[in-house]
């Protein structure tokens, strides 16, 4: 009987800076509602399981047959197993890359589906993509607005502090306020 090998899943940032900037976290609903139509349910479940495993150990290291069974893929772990196919789909669709030791570097962010992928998914998935991606982008706009307000407030506070620490400016300010 073959000894059960350990699988190693390491979290890494996506190599594309655009995906790092506007991509979706693995725990985001987008992964399940949009990417599942492209990569299938077992690969989606594997992606969604990893952040929880990383909370306990980085990189996540676990027996292959046990992990395969926990995903509902059976105990097989050979090159033609359902687990191997699931892991291969993550690599083929740019969600992970093989590492040198035989494990997987899994990207912490997933890109929005590309137009060619959207053409091949059901209408429901396209609708979910539109809704979730739009909300995701609006979140960035809110953050940019917030940063702008924080910057303006910081500048105002800095001016106030300068006036308060420079007596002649503070005195002139008080005199102007009193109309003198």
Image: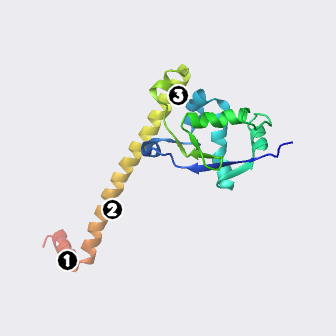
Q: What element does badge 2 sit on?
A: helix
Estimate the spatial distance between the alpha carbons at disc 1 and disc 2, rounded to whole Å: 23 Å
- The residue indicated by pointer 1 is 171
Q: Earlier in the sequence, mark 3 or mark 2?
A: 3
Estimate the spatial distance between the alpha carbons at disc 3 and disc 2, rounded to whole Å: 39 Å
Name the residue nearer the viewer: 18 or 141: 18
Number of marks in the image?
3
Q: Position of residue 93 (x, y in %)?
A: 55, 34
Q: Position of residue 64 (x, y in %)?
A: 75, 43
Viewer-nearest of labels 3 and 1? Answer: 3
Q: What element does badge 3 sit on?
A: helix
Q: Earlier in the sequence, mark 1 or mark 2?
A: 2
Viewer-nearest of labels 3 and 2? Answer: 3
Name the residue nearer the viewer: 80 or 33: 80
Q: Earlier in the sequence, mark 3 or mark 1?
A: 3
- Residue 60 showing in the rendered view: yes
């Amino acid at each position: 009987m073959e000894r059960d090998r350990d699988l190693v899943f390491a979290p890494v940032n996506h190599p594309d800076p655009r995906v790092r900037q506007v991509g979706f976290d693995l725990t985001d609903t987008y992964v399940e509602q949009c990417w599942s139509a492209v990569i299938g349910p077992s690969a989606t479940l594997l992606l969604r399981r990893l952040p929880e495993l990383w909370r306990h150990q980085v990189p996540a290291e676990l027996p292959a047959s046990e992990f395969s069974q926990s995903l509902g893929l059976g105990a097989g772990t050979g090159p033609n197993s359902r687990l191997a196919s699931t892991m291969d789909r993550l690599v083929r669709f740019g969600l992970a890359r093989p590492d040198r030791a035989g494990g997987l570097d899994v990207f912490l962010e997933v890109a929005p589906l590309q137009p060619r992928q959207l053409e091949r998914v059901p209408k429901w998935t396209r609708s979910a993509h539109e809704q979730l991606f739009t909300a995701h982008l609006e979140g960035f706009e809110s953050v940019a607005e917030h940063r702008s307000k924080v910057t303006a407030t910081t500048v105002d506070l800095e001016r106030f502090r300068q006036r308060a620490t420079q007596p002649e400016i503070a005195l002139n300010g008080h005199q102007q306020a009193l109309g003198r």
